[in-house]
Image (cartoon, rainbow, N blue to C red):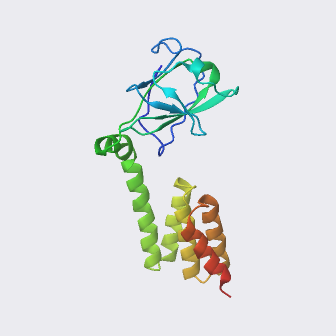
Amino acid sequence: MDITFARPNANWLLLALALGACASAPIGQIQSEPEGARVYATDGKELGVTPLDPAKLNLPDEAYSQLIFRKDGYLDAHLVIERRALDNVRFKLLPLGADGFQKNFVQPHAVPISQLVQEYLIAQGHLGARRFEAAERSLRALETKYPQLAATSVLWADLYMAQGKRPQAIDSLKQALRLNPTEPLIKSALERLEAKP
């Protein structure tokens, strides 16, 4: 089975193989294209270089194994592979650099990202112009299309503050922090708002 990752999500590539045999790879081989990728366990231990015999991996006896493949000039491939399918895996690594980034990241995501940015800026523009009803409509539309976008909750907080609705603003920032718990700006904005009398 040949696998080409054309639409990766950041640098994590997740694959759960349910097939016991892959016709395009010789029996008992884990292969990358190009060959020569270093194979690592999740603890950082190097397991070998592709092509690799899976019998030599000495992985824990678990149903699934996660392997990391690294080669200079290519995006790391993180694969979760069903153990019974581990003996025949072949995949292509994605090249780094301007051409690879453009082809594999920018082009597949350009239109959706542009639409998101446009819709977000429209909502922000309504808020800045104090057109609160239009801002609310835009924010509801953003929430419907992008329910996991913390920035929408931050805009709700801005809207509520502009309307003098501090408790709702705090709730919106708490929602934003639930959606993006590692964002320090959301956390500090929430702390400042909760600290005000």
* Res 182 quadrant in image: bottom right
* Res 97 quadrant in image: top left
Q: Is residue 144 above or below residue 51?
A: below
Taking the view exactly as shown, the residue that stands out farthest to the bottom is: 197
Q: Is residue 103 left or right of residue 14?
A: left
Q: Is residue 45 left or right of residue 72?
A: right
Tell me residue 170's x, y (percent): 65, 74
Task: Report the residue at 54% width, 58% height from top.
Answer: 149
* Res 101 quadrant in image: top left
Q: Is residue 118 above or below residue 9?
A: below
Task: Report the residue at 63% width, 24% height from top.
Answer: 58
Task: Report the residue at 38% width, 44% height from top.
Answer: 105
Name the one closer to the observer, 37 or 134: 37
Tell me residue 47's x, y (percent): 55, 29
Report whether residue 117 is seen.
yes
Tell me residue 116's x, y (percent): 44, 57
Q: Quadrant of the C terminus?
A: bottom right
Name the one closer to the observer, 87 or 51: 51
Tell me residue 27's x, y (percent): 52, 11
Name the one closer to the observer, 187 or 125: 187
Task: Report the residue at 61% width, 80% height from top.
Answer: 192
Name the one closer to the observer, 85 or 48: 48
Report whether residue 86 is seen.
no
Q: How many marks?
A: 0
Taking the view exactly as shown, the residue that stands out farthest to the right is: 61
Q: Is residue 102 left or right of residue 187?
A: left
